[in-house]
Amino acid sequence: MRQVAIDAWVEAAHSVNSGASYRSGRQARSVLDDARETVASLLGCEPIEVIFTASGTEADNIAVQGLYRAARVAGRPARIITTPIEHPAVLEPAQNLGAEVEFLPLGRDGHVGDLSALDTPAALATCMWANNETGAIQPVEELCRRASAQDTAVHIDAVQVVGKVPVDFAAVGATTLAASAHKFGGPRGAGLLLARRSPAPQPLAFGGGQERGIRPGTVDVASAAALAAALRESVAEMNAEAARIGALRDTLRAGLLGAIDNVVVNTAEPALPSHLHLSFPGTDSDSLLMLLDGEGIEASAGSACHAGVTRMSHVLEAMGVSADEGRGSLRFTLGRGTTQADVDAVCATLPGLIERARGV
Ligand code: PLP
């Protein structure tokens, strides 16, 4: 967590229920209003469009299930258009609504290209802004434009981009957009759903009507304040950090490609500057991860949320990566704390581990 987020959280930790009408309740409400206004001004939306949630997963679920239900009530077809590389927080609800789910075709570079499925009306189109495994940035503006021409609601999972890439909710043209505080230095267990006034998602839970009734329950004011503080700082640093991290990532890629034979690069531009996903045929991710961990280097194989599961990630599968390549894949994610010394350590360590793993 960023220090500004910890400070904001501690300062707001005494906040009482922001729905209470007595003085301390009004004070809590004012902290929450400030957080909402900060988020709105940083992400190009109106304060009323900001819904605080308990995670990116919850925001995705409210959007996918709630927009689908709202669309069905309005008589839209039982059809969802999405991509095969969504996070399970989108993929699983989409596949459990009884809808016909149509996947946009994906290239070997991890990008969706052919958007023609959007030219036929659907209840919902949902697409991630950037993929969490490869970092591939998807054409979300074009996707929103094509879907909107058919009055199809669009949800964008922007969990990987908020705080890292400029986001203007109004300009993108999505119906809803999800983010997660821990991705930009805020607390874990705090997320955001930006939701236009109309069409609004139907609620999944019913209660006291907080957050426009879309996400009822007493609001965690301290987490909202911490989220806003983290977002403010990450947006202020965004350009400089993208340049710094991108340069480190390029050095890492060049160092590894120069020292190791037969490397497949799975991260293709346009991509987040933070991600580098590589395959080393003839190796096995699990043993590489264990050896790297022993050297104090923390990487992941598929999606970090799936660490421990050995089958090839659904993202690599959808990209058409072969089983042999997919088995020996590593995802390096660089961030705020990553330094040149970290990159040097990986470049000095990994080539020897790959040689050992390949038995050469
Ligand atoms: N969507 C994407 C693209 C993610 O990368 C993640 C988490 O890594 C999520 C959704 C879920 O967010 P949370 O961890 O806040 O539940």
Image (cartoon, rainbow, N blue to C red):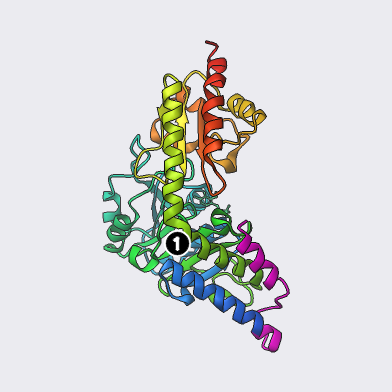
Q: Is residue 39 left or right of residue 79?
A: right
Residue 326 screen position, x and y as percent:
48, 28
Q: Is residue 42 above or below residue 358?
A: below
Query: For residue 209, what is the image quadrant?
Result: bottom right
Q: Is residue 184 above or below residue 34?
A: above
Given residues 66 and 6, the one toward you in this image is 6
Residue 204 screen position, x and y as percent:
56, 65
Mark 1 sits near ligand 1, with its Cβ under 8 Å away:
no
Which quadrant does the N terminus fall into? bottom right
Q: SS for tag 1? A: strand
Given residues 109 and 91, the one toward you in this image is 109
Q: Residue furthest top?
A: 360
Q: Does residue 3 appear in this view?
A: yes
Picture residue at 61% right of the left edge, 63% below the top: 4
According to the image, label 1 marks what residue? 177
Q: Residues within 10 Å of mark 1 (few under 14, many from 20)?
A: many
User: Does 9 appear in magenta?
Assistant: yes
Q: Residue furthest right?
A: 14
Q: Amino acid at mark 1?
A: Leu
User: Does 134 appear in magenta?
Assistant: no
Q: Which residues are magenta?
A: 1-26
Picture residue at 46% right of the left edge, 45% below the top: 245
Q: Is residue 192 left or right of residue 273?
A: right
